Image (cartoon, grey):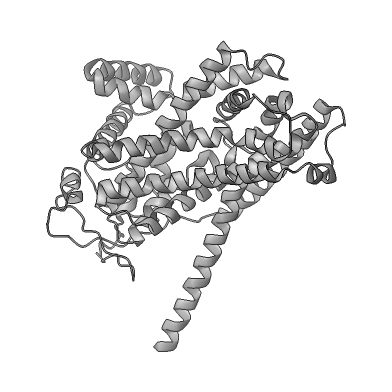
């Protein structure tokens, strides 16, 4: 959930997802849409086809931004050939795999180490944890985790309907899980969106449309994440949820810093939508100040990127705002996904029979402070830090089962997506090898 880094690095990562077809208004921030369209150096154009999947027509025109809403409504038009997209680069991926394993191991080690200090050695052993399992609690935990997955897939279904006029649930499900997987294994969670764009282009969705779908889902997720987070952090302070918590000052300071960073892009976009002249002047002032401090190297390029982000957001938002019912359903899904995700620690404690009656709000608010407090950590999945912060936050509720509750929470919101992504990747590799062998045999 490294949302704040995604807001600035999404486009630069997406650039490796595919080639470089231009889309005027439907490109994610910093030209991510160009990544999806796919243009090889020789300039050869190939029609992207996938057996068993309908081919979506690309909107006419150089960018296609203005035509997408009409296209989704069923307007006819000539579909130009779409060039073959290229997958995100895999250079030095083995290094990141080693880093991922190392930070996960560090996180689990710190989890049990800090937990042992807090519980003064009285924490549950593995046998104790197994003996404390509640069947009803486990059932509720599984239901909540499955709910998070279903709602995220539903978000893609809704946006698919708005942009391309069809739901395509199978594509939506795999797009969702691939995004979670690549977010989880890349620093700053920058790998998910480029892979989602690339995968959708292999299923017959044009580069402009796949970029629009991913971008709408991306901004919706940011909105849900920051809105739920802000509400629970404000109410958490009002009701004193951090009182008596180990490391309460650290959680408080880090949490508010994380929320501030995550609000940069939503506030930036809101200013440009409602106060465009003032926002443009203010942005120019910040860029000029950054240039004087040698933080910004190219003022014109920085301003162009800022304005591009706004254009991308407005163009994408116009697509779904024309479908009010889908817009309401999409926003509801974004809020529901984040609400369920933030509630997972409470149900992990219920699964281990912890005495958390009447503590739903407290545990959820503590999770919000923890999640935002580590959201700017660059390691994949914030591993190595989030486990330690979680132990500090949940010490007031989990008791002797503290370490195991945090481990279950991390598995439910992070490790499970790594596992599912590995299964999908292995299955795809096997299917691809089988098809290649059949093709060679037939030749």
368 or 129: which is nearer to us? 129
Can residue 8 be seen?
Answer: no
* Residue name at image x 49 percent, y 66 percent: 428
In percent of width and height, residue 130 lies at 79, 46
Image location (x, y in percent) of residue 157? 35, 49
The vertical placement of 138 against 89, above or below, is: above
Residue at left 59%, top 21%? 254
Of 210 and 395, the residue lying toward us: 395
Q: Position of residue 99 (x, y in %)?
A: 64, 46
Q: Quadrant of residue 109?
A: top right
Position of residue 258 in the picture relative to residue 282 (left or right): right
Hey, which residue is sitting farthest front in the picture? Answer: 136
The reply to whether residue 204 is in sight is: yes
Side of 133 relative to 373 (left or right): right
Q: How many marks?
A: 0
Q: Quadrant of the C terminus?
A: bottom left
x and y percent of residue 18 in the render? 36, 54
**Residue at 34% of width from left, 41% of height from top?**
215
Identity of the residue furthest to the right in this view: 121
In the rendered image, which quarter is residue 81 located in?
bottom left
> Is residue 357 positioned above or below 436 on the image?
above
* In the displayed structure image, the side of residue 6 where residue 363 appears, left or right: right
Q: Residue at x 52, y 21 (%)?
A: 232
């Amino acid at each position: 959930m490294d949302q704040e880094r995604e807001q600035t690095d999404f486009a630069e990562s997406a650039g490796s997802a595919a080639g470089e077809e231009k889309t005027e208004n439907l490109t994610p921030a910093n030209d991510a849409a160009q990544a999806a369209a796919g243009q090889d150096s020789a300039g050869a154009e190939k029609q992207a086809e996938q057996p068993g999947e309908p081919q979506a027509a690309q909107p006419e025109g150089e960018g296609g931004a203005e035509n997408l809403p009409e296209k989704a409504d069923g307007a006819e038009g000539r579909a130009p050939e779409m060039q073959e997209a290229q997958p995100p680069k895999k250079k030095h991926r083995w290094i990141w795999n080693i880093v991922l394993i190392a930070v996960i191991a560090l996180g689990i080690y710190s989890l049990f180490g800090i937990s042992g200090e807090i519980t003064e050695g009285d924490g549950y052993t593995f046998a104790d944890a197994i003996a404390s399992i509640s069947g009803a609690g486990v059932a509720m935990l599984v239901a909540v985790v499955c709910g998070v997955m279903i709602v995220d897939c539903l978000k893609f279904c809704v946006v698919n309907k708005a942009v391309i006029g069809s739901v395509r649930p199978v594509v939506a499900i795999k797009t969702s899980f691939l995004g979670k997987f690549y977010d989880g294994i890349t620093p700053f969670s920058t790998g998910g969106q480029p892979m989602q764009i690339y995968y959708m282009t292999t299923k017959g969705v044009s580069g402009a449309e796949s970029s629009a779908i991913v971008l709408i889902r991306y901004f919706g997720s940011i909105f849900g994440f920051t809105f739920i987070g802000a509400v629970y952090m404000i109410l958490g302070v009002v009701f004193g949820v951090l009182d008596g918590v180990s490391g309460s000052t650290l959680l408080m300071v880090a949490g508010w810093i994380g929320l501030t960073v995550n609000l940069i892009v939503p506030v930036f976009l809101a200013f440009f939508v409602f106060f465009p002249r003032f926002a443009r002047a203010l942005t120019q002032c910040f860029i000029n100040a950054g240039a004087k401090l040698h933080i910004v190297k190219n003022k014109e390029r920085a301003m162009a990127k800022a304005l591009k982000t706004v254009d991308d957001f407005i163009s994408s938002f116009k697509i779904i705002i024309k479908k009010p019912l889908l817009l309401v359903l999409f926003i509801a899904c974004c809020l529901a996904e984040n609400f369920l995700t933030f509630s997972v620690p409470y149900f992990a404690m219920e699964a281990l029979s912890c005495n958390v009656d009447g503590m739903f709000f407290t545990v959820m608010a503590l999770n919000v402070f923890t999640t935002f407090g580590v959201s700017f950590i660059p390691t994949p999945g914030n591993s190595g830090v989030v486990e330690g912060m979680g132990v500090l936050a949940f010490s007031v509720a989990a008791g002797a089962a503290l370490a195991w509750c945090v481990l279950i929470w991390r598995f439910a919101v992070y490790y499970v997506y790594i596992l599912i992504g590995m299964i999908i990747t292995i299955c795809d590799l096997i299917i691809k090898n089988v098809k290649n062998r059949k093709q060679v045999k037939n030749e």
